Every structure is written in structure tokens, then in C-alpha cells.
Image: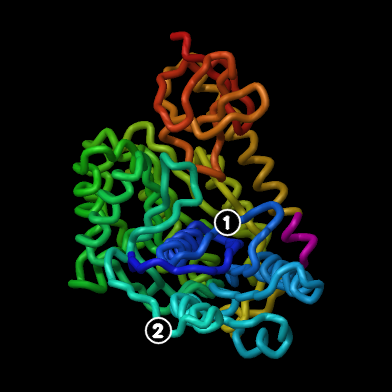
């Protein structure tokens, strides 16, 4: 982090983060940089009190883009009404549509993309009349202001993606895959452990490609094993793997290290060979079945999270039926799904007609999610009577809310324990599951 001498009369800045956890890490790093320069920072306040608002936007799919635009317009109006003094925008949306946004929303004082957002500090120093007067030394760039509960953090190990799936705008926004140096990542882990972090959500656009751009080899297994050996790291959870060229040694690391959670987030999108080919996934139906089966054999009890897509151009009733059949067979412990939406600049937008009617997309999405709801209910009910290790995230009404190793924050089922048991947030407990709903468990520490 950059450390500076005393600064007076600095503005208060409220950060609004939209989109994925990778955006959240960017916000946390920028907040840390501002804080080290004497600014006060807040994050996602219900009632922003800062003189300056910074919005970190998402530009991935249509709904996310619209949310970002609506949020910018809301704060542009607040600026017009004198409720805030300055408004800045950063992130994926402005990286992708900078010229259009500058023309359409002139109330914004500065636009920054996905990679140059650190320049915002220099902009504000100039506005505050400090220019180059700040006496700073450059230090540990990974230090940041955590916006998550203190016991867990997101750990971004790379940026960008070299895959070119037909529907996906990520490579357009983020560019080619760039792995962070392993030593730097491990130093960040040690720093976060020193700050009280026990649980790490390892994230990237393409986790399993880590290291290939550095020396042509996949190094994700080595990275995770070295993380697992750091004292104080109690849980490591892996997000956003890719099925093609999957590094099998990663499963060995998961199986042999108790602090590497038996959990893997791997987006599969579809199962029909026709759809996989049109999507440019470079993976087949047969390979997918083999992959899932081998994962479950290599890591007994592994919980798999995936994302599936319906309504991609050319998807037939037969293609969708294959997807339903696959979902019944795979019995994913966690699954999300979405309907295809055409994204500017992607291969599918240029070469395919968006020919599945919206009502058909919605019907298919609803059928798929009803099936998954039934599967999830059965899987969670089977946990009744089991002893699970959980970490407590927060209280909510009459409950402590925790998670097992099989549950990532924000997106997965939670474990509810009566508030009367007087537990401590951020601590681990062994609990016995007493009841289950479709997406939540009830438990007690009385074993």
C-alpha cells in the first residue's frame, strides 16, 4: 500500500460496487489506496454521506448493464440536487462503453475503466489542491479495506480470459488472461491472515488457466497447495474453473488438504454437442459426463456448483431435453441458470440470429430451475443428522447464520442455528443438522 504523511481536509468517499466479487476486490484495493492518502471511505452505504461517490460498474450481461446505468443516473440526479459534490464511475461498463457514456451522462466528473482506476486518486488530489504535495512511499499493493466480514475475503489470482466462448463479452472487457505472480498472491494471503481472515474465496475469470501465460504450464494446484500450507488458512474455496484441459492434480490437492474445501465452481453452460459447438466451448457431451464422474470419484463428497444457459441461438426442444436429462444425472449440489441475451461484439451477436423467443427462454429457465429446486431439496434433506463444521457469518432475527465448507457466501445455502446458543461471529463450530429446506439447513451445537 502507498503510505503518506498527514493530509488535512480530505473528502469522504462512498464506494458503490456492482457486479461480481472480482469487482469487489478492485473496490477494496482502491479504498485502501484512498484511505492511506487520508481520505475517509465507506462502502455500499444505505444512505451515502460522502461528498464524493465512486460507482464500480458491471458490463457483463444486459441486466447488469442496466443496473449499472440506473445507479449512475440515480447519483447523477443526487449531484444535480446538491446531495453529493462529485461523481466518478469505474469498472467494466465504462471500460466497454466509455465514449457513449461520456456523451450521455455529462454529470459524471470522471470515467475510469477496468485497469486505470488508480488514476482517480491523482484526479482527486488535484481537485483537493494537493497536486504532487503528498509525500508517499510505494509499498504493498495488495493491502485493502475489506468490505466482507473480517473472517473471509475474496482472493483474485488473475485477470482476463483467453477463452472465446461465442456468447461471452468478458475477453472484450478484460483482455487476455494475466496471472498474478505466485509470490505476490501468497504474500497477500499472509497479510490477510494477519488481519484475521480465515477463509479465502479464490476467484478468477478462468481459475484453471492460472500460470499458463507465465511459463506455459497450469500452476493452480501448486498455488492452492502452497496456500493450504500457510498457518491460519482454515478454508480455501475455488471459483470459476473451466472444463477443457482441467488440471487433475488440483483434485489431489483438494482431497489431501483438509483446509481446501470439497467445493468447485465450474461453469458448464450446456450439454448438447450442438450447443457446445455453437457456443465454442471446445468440450463435448461425452467429456462432460466423464469429467463429472471422475470429479466425484477423486473427491468423495465434493459439492459442485455450475452455471447453465438456456435459449442460446439454435437451441431446440431436443437440446433442452438433453440439458434436463443431464441435470437429473449430475445432481449438482449448487446450480445457477440464465437465459441467453445477445451481447455487443461477441461472436454470437455477429454470426447468429437470436431466434429463441423470449417466452420460450423463460419457460425453459423455469423448468430447469424447478428441477434443480427438487434436486437441492433432496440433497439438503440427506444432511439431516450429519455433523458439519460451520463458520458463523452474522445474526439474523432469531438465528445465527453460518456456512459449511460446501457453501460460498451470498450464493449458496446457509446453516441457521438458534440465537440462544450464544455463538461468536467469525468462529468455527461443529453442528448437527436437525432439519432442512430447499436451500437452507437448521442445526444445533448440541451434538
Measured in 3D between alpha carbons, the distance from the residue under mark 2 to the one under mark 1, in whole angstroms, is 27 Å
Residue 32, can we see it?
A: yes
Q: Main secondary structure of the magenta part?
A: helix
Q: Residue at x 37, y 55 (%)?
A: 155
Horizontal arrangement in the rendering, residue 22 relative to residue 413 (left or right): left
Where does the image place residue 420, in percent across and percent down from the top left? 58, 14
Residue 357: say if magenta: yes
Answer few, some or many: residues within 10 Å of disc 1's Cα (few below 14, many 20 plus, some between 14 and 19): some
Q: Is residue 380 above or below residue 259?
A: above
Q: Quadrant of residue 435?
A: top right
Answer few, some or many: residues within 10 Å of disc 2's Cα (few below 14, many 20 plus, some between 14 and 19): few
Q: Earlier in the sequence, mark 2 or mark 1?
A: 1
Q: Is residue 167 above or below residue 232?
A: below
User: Residue 435 versus residue 126: which sits nearer the camera?
Assistant: 126
Horizontal arrangement in the rendering, residue 185 relative to residue 441 (left or right): left
Q: Residue at x 48, y 42 (%)?
A: 149
Q: Which residue is mark 1?
A: 43
Q: Which residues are magenta?
A: 356-362
Q: Which mark is residue 286?
A: none
User: Residue 229 versus residue 332: which sits nearer the camera?
Assistant: 229
Q: Quadrant of residue 175?
A: bottom left
Q: Secondary structure at mark 1?
A: strand
Q: Which residue is mark 2?
A: 132
Amino acid at each position: 500500500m502507498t503510505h503518506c504523511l498527514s493530509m488535512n481536509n480530505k473528502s469522504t468517499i462512498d464506494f458503490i460496487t456492482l457486479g461480481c466479487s472480482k469487482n469487489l476486490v478492485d473496490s477494496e484495493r482502491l479504498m485502501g489506496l484512498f484511505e492511506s492518502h487520508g481520505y475517509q471511505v465507506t462502502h455500499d452505504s444505505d444512505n451515502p454521506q460522502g461528498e464524493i461517490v465512486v460507482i464500480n460498474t458491471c458490463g457483463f450481461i444486459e441486466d447488469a448493464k442496466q443496473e449499472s446505468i440506473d445507479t449512475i443516473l440515480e447519483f447523477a440526479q443526487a449531484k444535480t440536487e446538491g446531495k453529493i459534490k462529485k461523481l466518478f464511475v469505474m469498472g467494466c461498463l465504462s471500460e466497454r462503453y466509455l465514449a457513449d457514456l461520456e456523451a450521455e451522462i455529462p454529470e459524471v466528473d470522471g470515467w475510469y475503466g477496468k485497469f486505470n482506476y488508480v488514476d482517480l486518486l491523482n484526479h482527486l488530489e488535484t481537485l483537493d489542491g494537493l497536486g504532487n504535495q503528498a509525500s508517499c512511499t510505494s509499498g504493498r499493493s495488495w493491502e485493502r479495506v475489506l468490505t466482507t466480514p473480517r473472517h473471509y475475503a475474496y482472493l483474485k489470482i488473475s485477470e482476463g480470459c483467453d477463452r472465446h466462448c461465442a456468447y461471452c463479452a468478458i475477453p472484450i472487457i478484460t483482455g487476455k488472461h494475466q496471472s498474478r505472480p505466485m509470490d505476490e498472491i501468497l504474500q497477500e494471503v499472509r497479510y490477510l491472515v494477519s488481519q484475521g481472515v480465515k477463509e479465502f474465496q479464490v476467484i478468477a475469470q478462468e481459475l484453471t488457466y492460472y500460470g499458463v501465460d507465465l511459463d506455459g504450464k497450469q500452476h493452480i494446484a501448486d498455488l492452492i497447495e502452497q496456500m493450504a500450507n500457510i498457518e491460519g488458512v482454515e478454508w480455501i474455496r475455488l471459483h470459476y474453473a473451466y472444463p477443457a484441459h482441467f488440471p487433475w492434480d488440483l483434485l489431489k490437492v483438494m482431497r489431501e488438504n483438509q483446509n481446501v474445501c470439497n467445493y468447485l465452481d465450474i461453469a458448464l453452460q450446456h450439454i448438447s454437442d450442438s450447443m457446445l459447438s455453437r457456443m465454442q466451448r471446445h468440450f463435448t457431451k461425452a467429456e462432460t459426463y466423464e469429467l463429472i464422474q471422475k470429479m466425484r470419484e477423486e473427491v468423495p463428497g465434493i459439492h459442485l456448483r455450475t452455471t447453465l444457459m438456456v435459449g442460446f441461438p439454435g437451441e431446440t426442444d431436443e437440446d433442452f431435453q438433453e440439458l434436463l436429462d443431464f441435470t437429473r444425472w449430475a445432481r449438482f449440489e449448487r446450480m445457477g441458470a440464465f437465459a441467453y441475451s445477445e451481447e455487443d461484439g461477441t461472436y454470437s451477436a455477429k454470426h447468429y440470429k437470436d431466434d429463441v423467443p423470449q417466452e420460450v427462454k423463460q419457460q425453459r429457465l423455469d423448468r430447469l430451475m424447478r428441477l434443480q429446486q427438487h434436486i437441492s431439496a433432496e440433497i439438503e434433506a440427506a444432511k439431516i443428522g450429519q455433523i458439519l463444521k460451520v463458520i458463523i457469518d452474522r445474526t439474523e432475527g432469531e438465528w445465527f447464520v453460518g456456512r459449511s465448507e460446501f457453501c460460498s457466501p451470498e450464493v449458496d445455502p446457509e446453516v441457521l442455528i438458534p440465537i440462544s446458543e450464544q455463538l461468536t461471529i467469525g468462529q468455527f463450530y461443529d453442528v448437527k443438522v436437525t432439519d432442512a429446506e430447499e436451500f437452507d439447513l437448521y442445526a444445533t451445537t448440541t451434538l
